[in-house]
Image: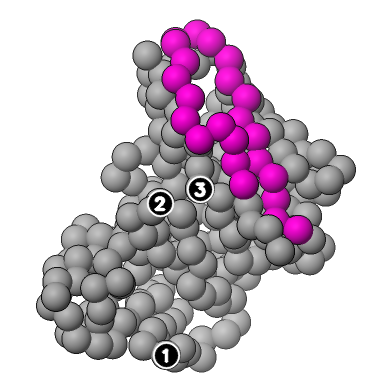
Amino acid sequence: ETGVTQSPTHLIKTRGQQVTLRCSSQSGHNTVSWYQQALGQGPQFIFQYYREEENGRGNFPPRFSGLQFPNYSSELNVNALELDDSALYLCASSPKIGLAGDREQFFGPGTRLTVL
Amino acid sequence: AQKVTQAQTEISVVEKEDVTLDCVYETRDTTYYLFWYKQPPSGELVFLIRRNSFDEQNEISGRYSWNFQKSTSSFNFTITASQVVDSAVYFCALSERSTGGFKTIFGAGTRLFVKA
């Protein structure tokens, strides 16, 4: 059973650019969540997707958007990058059963994004 | 408003000491979930335990134990006979309903140093 994988590992962009981060969920998991983790802080919830639909969103502006595909892989897109977007972006998958509540999440290693 | 508070930023212990990591949460939901995750120096978050709001039974798993008390909104984590490999950042997290689903809120984390 393969775990959660993310690509790329590291990325450097300049302010104003757009970026797409990718995540491959653990086999059998139909839910994916994305988090932003600034240095020395806890992960901040961006949004969650369940069966290709957004299923909860944190306090992030609309320039943060996502997609989940039929094979449950997903993307995080960030437009008009700002310096404060520099962080570790974590993807987590879980075997959610319906919409009854949250299950334990299995995290990927993250993508380190640096915005210059 | 801070939803998950981990008041201890850093804790340093000597191997074989017991250590308790505190977590206090805030929610208006009657249905919610609490989690503990470990983030070792390698960076990947590892799930440790999940509790739902209707299950106040404390749990012991090897050297780990958890004390969930709804009356004080606390979900504390104790490591007995700590080991150097326990050195990591530990996060407490709360999953509660949000518009369209659930969202997970992490605390700021407690960095645990276990010295040999």
Label count reads 3
Q: Decide which of A60, B15 is in the foreground and name it.
A: B15
The numbered mark at residue B62 is: 1
Residue plotted at (36% across, 88% down): B63
Mark 3 burial class by Cα count in 10 Å: few <14, some 14-19, many 20+: many
Residue plotted at (25% across, 87% down): B81
> Does the image show residue B83?
yes
Q: Amino acid at mark 2?
A: Gly
Q: Are tags 3 and 2 found on a single chain? A: no
| Image spot of residue B41 (x, y percent) | 33, 55
Residue lying farthest to the right in this orientation:
A70
Give how far apart the Cα atoms at labels 3 and 2 are: 7 Å
Q: Return the chain for callout 2.
A: B
Q: Are tags 3 and 1 found on a single chain? A: no
> Bounds of the magenta span?
A5-27
Residue plotted at (47% across, 44% down): A44
Asked whether disc 3 touches disc 2, contact meaning CB atoms under 8 Å apart, the reply is yes
Q: Quadrant of the C terminus of chain A?
A: top left
Give how far apart the Cα atoms at labels 1 and 2 are: 23 Å
For mark 3, what is the residue? A109
For mark 2, what is the residue? B43
The numbered mark at residue A41 is: none
